[in-house]
Image (cartoon, grey):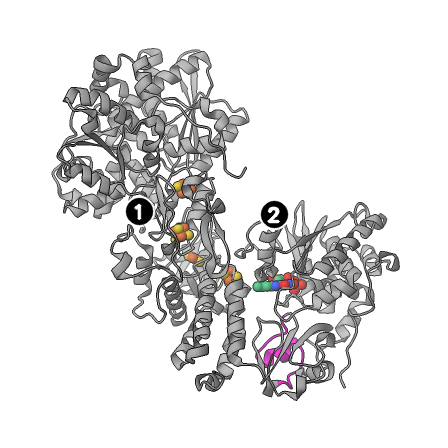
Amino acid sequence: MINLTVDNKEVTVEPNSTILEAASKVNVNIPTLCFSDDLTVYGGCRLCVVEVEGSDRLRPACNTRAREGMEVKTHSPRVREVRKTLFELIIASHDISCELNCLICNRQNSCQLKDVAEDIGISRMCLTPGADEERESDHSSHSVVREPNKCINCARCIRKCEEIQGVGVFAQASRGPETKVTTFKDRGMGNVECTNCGQCVVSCPTGALHEVYHMDQVWESLYDEQKHVIVQTAPSVRVALAESFGEEPGTIATGQMVAALRRLGFDRVFDTNFTADLTIMEEATEVVNRVTNNDNLPVLTSCSPGWIKYIEHFYPDYLQHLSSAKSPQQMFGAVAKTYYAENAGIDPEDLVVVSIMPCTAKKFEASRPEMNDDVDYVLTTREAARMLKSVGVDVCNLEPEKYDEMLGVSSGAGDIFGASGGVMEAAVRTAYNMITGVNLQEIEVTPVRGLEGLKSAEIPVTDDLTLKVGVAHGLNNAGIMMEKIKAGEEFHFVEMMACPGGCISGGGQPINTERSWREVREKRIAGLYDIDENKELRLSHENPKIQKLYEEFLQEPGSSKAHKLLHTEYVTRGVPGT
Amino acid sequence: MLQERKFLKGPELRDIDDYDFPGFQKALEMGPEAIVEEISKSGLLGRGGAGFPTGKKWELAYQEEGENKYIICNADEGEPGTFKDRYLLDERTLKVLEGIMIGAYTIDADTGYIYIRGEYSRQIEILEETLQKARKAGILGEDILGSNFSFDIKLVRGAGCYVCGDETSLLNSLEGMRGSSRSKPPYPISKGLYGCPTLVNNVESLACSAEILNQGAEKFASMGTEESSGTKLVSLSGDINFPGVYEVEFGSASLQEIIEDLGGGSQQGQEIKFIIPGGLSTPIVPSDNLQAEYSYEGLQQAGSSVGSGGMMVISTAQELSDILTRIARFYMDESCGTCLPCREGNKQIYRIISEAKYAGLTVDRLNLIQDIGDTMQEAARCGLGRSAQLPIGTILSEYKEELIEGGNLP
Ligand SMILES: Cc1cc2nc3c(=O)[nH]c(=O)nc-3n(C[C@H](O)[C@H](O)[C@H](O)COP(=O)(O)O)c2cc1C
Ligand code: SF4
Ligand code: SF4
Ligand code: SF4
Ligand code: FES
């Protein structure tokens, strides 16, 4: 162990800890910008510099190891002077202005520049703010917009995409003040191997990256008397939306969210969990068939559109391994525009299907030609929060209400879709029943839960069959899993989620600048398992509304009608420039 | 009258047939530990600018464990005003080669790189030919001179930016990445090229090492002063009559003598205003301080440093504002753009200075440059940003009145 003092407070840390870690142990807050607890250290912004007794210059706290006997001053006059100048330099390079953009910026509530300004206590500017030249925004993607004028070159997006997602869409180009973050040959995010996962968005400290907004279109539909506008809410939204209204991560706000969306003017409020149950029925059926026939094993899950685009780019040879089942969002769209429209007596032309998703890739998914506009608009959790705020609805102060029945009843298996391992667990619960005719005794498949990047489990089913399942989350881990599969490691069924931790920390979720990634993820995940645990109904195949849907409309899981509506195909994309 | 002291300099030495690498042969006899001791004893300090003791560096690299180790000869020579490595590559090619081989043998590297400034076309040709001949002659390759030691060298042409001379940026560039610095730690010695232990030395340091084995550490240490052993190649340029590369024994001369006796004094008898003694990243020495002794300690006392030995002499014929603008522009353009203080600081300094050229400098603006400069020096990530404002800062403080009164403005 290593003993040092930070601002005269004694602290003991593990060997190899940084000064930043030591400081946080004694609750000293050192401003940071390029640092992120889930990424490699970059040392670019230098805001974290501190004075180390005996050192000729200041040292970056994020990249300096604590040493025995070190005396660190984190807010000495020398440090504060330097930090103020650094901050001025950032602002002078950033396209920032109260009149023009701070008030309408997507990050008005989670701008880390504002946090840092407050931490530093800056009250005077000597440099004139403003970027030198306008840089054009990148609107090439269906999911993510990049506004380089707001970029401060912290490289968090670059590192996130490369280290956590294993994709590497961004790089820095040019040098000096011309240095910019860009994509291969400046082609734009929509024209390279970007998976639309939005992990770069949630890592960005400024408003330089954000989702492609669908808010205006949704407003227009809501205001249009002719339109019947229904909304579906993804599992992870209910444990994150409240964060935008000041609550802790993981706060469960299902009923309040439903009430709020009614106030916003949606004609029906439905649940994506309902079609999550439906997805399980279709996918489990497929798994059982394919396992029985040893057909292209392992089966790979298909509900994460970021993962789908990833495999289409990087492992197109394995597309036939993907489950053909559409994602819950798209199953919902397909069922809504047929079954629901028929039952409610609405012309599908007048029906507008909106989803609220923790995900930016869902926007791209909805736009895929294979999905025939079943889902019209996709709002992220953040967009939903902004819309609610703009009509004066404070989600947390509403009386909870229930989902509309027809497409709104779901099992706990649907809820846990939002956590890494959840789809697997839900599918195992149902597949087991399909094969054996009875339910699992212990329905909680705990080995596939949690934040471990790669997980696996063996589930004894019959004397002849032990299901071997794998789980990976974060695309870098998905890549590792694919390499294992390539190398011959055998699984029956593998769940892949593009985002680390699963959809609960998707690219469309509220951005929490106060807490560590790990804490936010753990709390949101705990929220979902809480919901599942407290539900009577915890098995997709026991959902009465799903049973009814099959009886009245789809016949049986895997039927030709189900195939036509609920299954899809994939595209070989490859990697540009290779 | 000051004379050159020739330890490194000598007749053109390029032809493998004329040279039997006595330093290297001696090295093979001595073994790594004795070599490290010899180099340490010589007191040689790195000639690339930072002045780190070469013996110590070799010792650390020798102690590193690793399946692959690399040695890199830093021939990027991008520091403005510096051209002494070019001389060595041109004229003393085999000494440089010998230095690399001795270093490689000492630390047990099987591959070496020469990272050479892209503009040095002639030197690139010379080296290519030399390396080829050396391979043919068995000086490079398997089992060199029957010693069981196998080693080869790759020549890599730099992509033309100053920051790639910084050892960590150089590593990125060699690996095919963008030329931008790496944060330290880890240091190249433990995790350098492709994550392997890597020894990076300047051309002159390596040539010196070869000569130290040839002529003995004692001879080297007997030259110079207590703290500055040996000789230094000085690239003399600017407003003088005989620019060129001169070898100066440390402590044997003042700056004035170097300028007068070797450089032939200022051009057309102009008055000297100041000199930049060690390349563009060292503080200026104003004319009233030219009695300072040429040595690490002498220049430190004069508020500057030996740096790379790129000595630029500036006379009163030059416009201060032009010089300031050019220096500021250079650093703005050459910042790798990774860290904020350097990327944005150099831009703002350039902005203020170039505006001042027409609008004049005010005390406020001067203070602002000072603040930004201090911040860069305190907080930048690599040596480029940390020293970028040294010449500008010292010019501004030395000639403050003149600049504020607008004495130098059109
Ligand atoms: C911006 C910058 C540029 C540099 N350029 C060079 C160079 O052109 N040649 C060189 O040998 N060292 C250069 N250096 C120093 C190297 O980083 C390194 O210290 C040196 O190559 C080590 O060799 P030495 O110990 O033999 O001096 C530069 C450093 C910085 C920060
Ligand atoms: S959306 Fe995902 S894949 Fe695309 S650039 Fe951002 S992090 Fe990378
Ligand atoms: S886009 Fe955002 S995360 Fe990426 S470098 Fe710019 S400010 Fe940083
Ligand atoms: S100091 Fe300049 S050159 Fe060095 S890392 Fe920072 S931006 Fe790059
Ligand atoms: S947070 Fe340490 S350098 Fe940016």
Q: Which residues are magenta?
A: B290-307
**In which quadrant of the rendered view does residue A271 lie?**
top left
**In which quadrant of the rendered view does residue B351 lie?**
bottom left
Q: Position of residue B244 (x, y in %)?
A: 72, 74
Q: Residue at x 46, y 19 (%)?
A: A297
Disc sitting over residue B194 in the figure: 2
Mark 1 sits on what residue? A511
Reply yes or no: does residue B320 show up in magenta.
no
Q: Residue furthest front?
A: B410
Q: Residue furthest right?
A: B17
Horizontal side, residue A55 vs residue A20: left or right: right
Q: Quadrant of ligand 5?
A: bottom left
Whether callout 1 and callout 2 share a subunit is answered no
Q: Amino acid at mark 1?
A: Ile
Q: Position of residue B120 (x, y in %)?
A: 69, 61
SS for callout 1: loop
User: Is the residue A58 above or below the residue B176 in the image?
Assistant: below
